[in-house]
Amino acid sequence: MGTITLSIDDGTEQDFRRLVEKILGKRKGALGEAATEAMKIWIREKTQEEIARDALELTEKAYHLGARRYTSRKDLYDR
């Protein structure tokens, strides 16, 4: 388990602590549990954004699929 020291503006800290206390209570480790959950959500969101960005880049690439070797549907099917 790692230790991170963060500097957060006072308003955000107070709101976060108030919400953690409301949802998880004043038990030991509640603040760390909530911070861990928040970080996991942030990581998942940023990862999905990266996946979407990579997918868009792939769709923007042009692919050469070869030359057209038929002039009509009849050339494709002998019926």
Image (cartoon, helix red, strand yellow):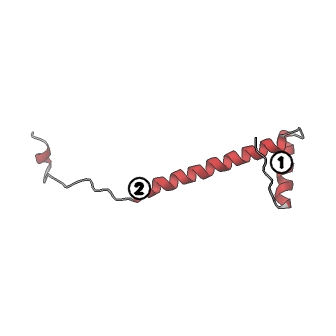
Residue 13 occupies which quadrant of the picture?
A: bottom right
- Which residue lies most toward the front here? 2
**Numbered label attached to residue 55:** none
Q: Residues within 10 Å of mark 2 (few under 14, many from 20)?
A: few
SS at circle 1: helix
Q: Earlier in the sequence, mark 1 or mark 2?
A: 1
Residue 47 image offset from top left, x and y in percent? 58, 50
Give amino acid for label 2. Thr
Residue 65 image offset from top left, x and y in percent? 26, 53
In this rendering, position of residue 64 left or right of residue 68? right
- Which residue lies most toward the right here? 26
SS at circle 2: helix
The residue lying at 76 percent from left, 40 percent from top is 1
**Numbered label attached to residue 59:** 2
In this rendering, position of residue 37 left or right of residue 19? left
Q: Nearer the viewer, mark 1 or mark 2?
A: 2
**Numbered label attached to residue 19:** 1
Q: CA distance from mark 1 to mark 2?
A: 42 Å
Residue 4 image offset from top left, x and y in percent? 78, 50
In this rendering, position of residue 16 left or right of residue 61? right
The residue lying at 84 percent from left, 40 percent from top is 29
